């Protein structure tokens, strides 16, 4: 059935007959079904599996939450929409709500900014020195 991010608290909501976010009570806004071209990007942290084996699960969870909050801010600042977060992977979309000829450029700028986020995060001592963000794009089959 899939999941989405709460528009208010950014928690991941499993969409199984849910009308309100179980974390903050915000109504779940489902998009009406429609097909259009969009760019979807998956960005995750390379070396994460290695890191997860060496780090205490609680600490790791805090680390990922902190980084994902930063990632969400960066994506939204650039006009993208965060679709979901799967572990250390953020999935975001340009052109789902409305498309613009700038979408490819904005996507590249966002990916660049996410790399900077990871660099800064690492400089703050949060990640191992060999971590960086890896991104890949895929055609978006359909909105919602
Ligand atoms: Zn919520």
Image: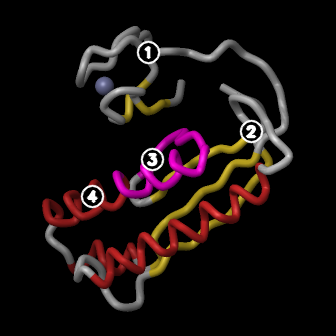
Q: Nearer the viewer, residue 76 or 20?
A: 76
Separation of disc 1 and disc 3 at Cα?
A: 17 Å
Element type at marker 1?
loop
Q: Is mark 4 within 8 Å of ligand 1?
A: no
Q: Dot 4: few (<14), some (14–19), or many (≥20) neighbours within 10 Å? A: few
Q: Which one is earlier in the sequence, the residue at label 4 or at label 2?
A: 4
Q: Which one is earlier in the sequence, the residue at label 4 or at label 3?
A: 4
User: Mark 3, mark 2: which one is toward the viewer?
Assistant: 2
Q: Which residues are magenta?
A: 69-86
Q: Are marks 1 and 3 in contact (CB under 8 Å)?
A: no
Q: Which one is earlier in the sequence, the residue at label 3 or at label 2?
A: 3
Residue to which mark 3 is pinned: 85
User: Mark 2, mark 1: which one is toward the viewer?
Assistant: 2
Q: Nearer the viewer, residue 20 or 78?
A: 78
Q: Is mark 3 within 8 Å of ligand 1?
A: no
Separation of disc 4 and disc 2 at Cα?
A: 26 Å
Element type at marker 2?
loop
The relative height of residue 24 versus residue 106 in the rendered view (above or below) is above
Task: Measuring from the top left, give residue 64's x and y in whole percent.
Answer: 30, 60
Task: Measuring from the top left, give residue 84's x and y in whole percent.
Answer: 49, 41
What residue do we see at 76% from left, 42% from top?
140
Q: Which one is earlier in the sequence, the residue at label 2 or at label 1?
A: 1
């Amino acid at each position: 059935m899939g999941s989405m991010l709460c528009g208010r608290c950014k928690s991941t909501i499993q969409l199984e007959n849910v009308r309100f976010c179980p974390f903050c009570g915000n109504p779940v806004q489902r998009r009406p079904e429609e097909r259009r071209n969009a760019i979807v990007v998956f960005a995750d942290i390379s070396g994460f599996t290695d890191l997860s084996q060496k780090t205490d699960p609680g600490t790791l969870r805090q680390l990922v939450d902190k980084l994902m909050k930063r990632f969400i801010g960066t994506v939204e600042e650039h006009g993208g929409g965060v679709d979901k977060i799967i572990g250390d992977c953020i999935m975001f979309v340009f052109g789902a709500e409305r498309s613009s000829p700038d979408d490819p450029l904005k996507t590249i700028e966002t990916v660049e900014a996410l790399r900077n986020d990871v660099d800064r995060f690492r400089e703050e001592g949060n990640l191992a020195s060999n971590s960086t963000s890896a991104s890949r794009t895929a055609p978006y089959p359909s909105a919602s």
